[in-house]
Image: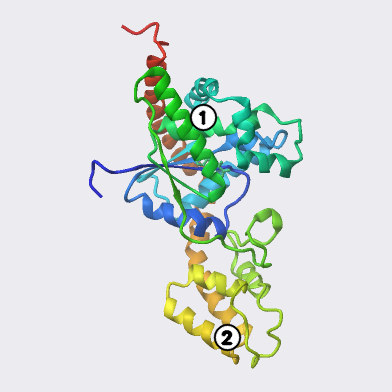
Amino acid sequence: MTQASRPTILTGDRTTGQLHLGHYIGSLRARVQLQNEADQFLLLADVQALTDNVGRHQKVTENVIEVALDYLAAGIDPAKSTILIQSQVPELAELSQYLLNLVTVARLERNPTIKEEIRLRGFERDIPAGFLTYPVSQAADITAFKATHVPVGDDQLPMIEQTNELVRRFNNTVDRAVLVECEAVLSKVTRLPGIDGKAKMSKSLGNAITLGATPDEITKAVNNMYTDPNHLRVSDPGRVEGNVVFSFLDAFEPDVAKVDELKAHYQRGGLGDSVVKRVLNERLQTLIEPIRTRRRELEEDRGEVLEILRRGTMRAREVAAQTLSEVKGALGLSYFQN
Ligand code: TRP
């Protein structure tokens, strides 16, 4: 990658839970790689988390630290990536305010992800205004850093689309290319299932393995994994589709030939669940051990973690303030300059 084309990446996490292997596979592992190739901003989206956690603000703020610990333990290097806390960058709220004039309530109500979330949360007509408008706040997160690439899951594609609409509308309004359109980067790996075989790993469903899991917790989770309910005797042929142990091996075992061989043997019959589970358990123990160890060390040194977050947030504020001053300048809101 040449210097001129070095992308700016912005990621955001609603900070409502400790990260688990699903996050690791879906995004965190890629971010650890991308920090070498791009100018990467990692946003801890506590303001957005508050839009559907009114009254649970304490949980939200506690989780900011938990997620930061997960990032750092998994290999995010503060010398390469900028970790920032959304609520501590007031420029983002200010930018949101200007963007809000460029979107209609009808358009906000059409965002499919918002629609689905409103349904899931049972808001019906009592939708908090902050919730309905969070895609605009998210557009501010992205555009404040002039991000060119935003790694997301497919549920976030409507947010990227809305962001780019706002960018075009703003630039058209001021007749100047101030804000930058971005591109969604979809993660290649398919979604990791929960250990119970449900489509999605999620802490609230109780089917997750967290990045701080103890050796016992990992072993227990692997032993409880959903396999093929019809694979009763070792000699029976087994199914690998929908078999969580094999989904995990696909995701975490780099030796593809070894996984293919295990699959073929399992399908033929003669390979017991316990053997495959042992292979996976060893793999996951090896993966999580250094993350857990690093996490424990960092937990002992919260002052250092807060200092990393403070420095990242300060750096982010400088970048966001520059964009905001261009935005206000383009709108003529620069009364006291020159
Ligand atoms: N909406 C994202 C989520 O629910 C979090 C988020 C906040 C985000 N700001 C962002 C994602 C900016 C990408 C870019 O997980």
Q: Quadrant of residue 320?
A: top left
Q: Earlier in the sequence, mark 1 or mark 2?
A: 1
Between disc 1 and disc 2, the foreground one is 2
> Left or right: 191 with respect to 164?
right
Q: Residue at x 42, y 76 (%)?
A: 255
Q: Position of residue 16 (x, y in %)?
A: 63, 44
Q: Which residue does the numbered mark 2 point to in the structure image?
A: 266
Q: Position of residue 335 (x, y in %)?
A: 40, 6
Q: Quadrant of residue 316?
A: top left
Q: Residue at x 71, y 87 (%)?
A: 232
Q: Are marks 1 and 2 in contact (CB under 8 Å)?
A: no
- Neighbour class for label 2 at 10 Å: few (<14), some, many (≥20)? many
Ligand 1 contact, mark 2 (Cβ < 8 Å): no
Confirm whether residue 78 shows in the render: yes
Q: Residue at x 62, y 88 (%)?
A: 237
In this rendered view, identify the residue nearer to me: 313 or 12: 12
Confirm whether residue 133 shows in the render: no
> At numbered mark 2, what does the secondary structure look like: helix, strand or loop?
helix
In this rendered view, identify the residue nearer to me: 299 or 43: 43
Measured along the vertical axis of the image, is residue 316 above or below residue 187? above
Measured along the vertical axis of the image, is residue 99 above or below residue 243? above
Distance CA(mark 1)–CA(mark 2)? 52 Å
Q: Position of residue 6 (x, y in %)?
A: 29, 43
Measured along the vertical axis of the image, is residue 260 above or below residue 102? below
Q: Amino acid at mark 2?
A: Tyr
Q: Amino acid at mark 1?
A: Gln
Q: Quadrant of residue 220?
A: bottom right
Residue 88 disc label: 1
> At numbered mark 1, what does the secondary structure look like: helix, strand or loop?
helix
> Left or right: 127 with respect to 90?
right
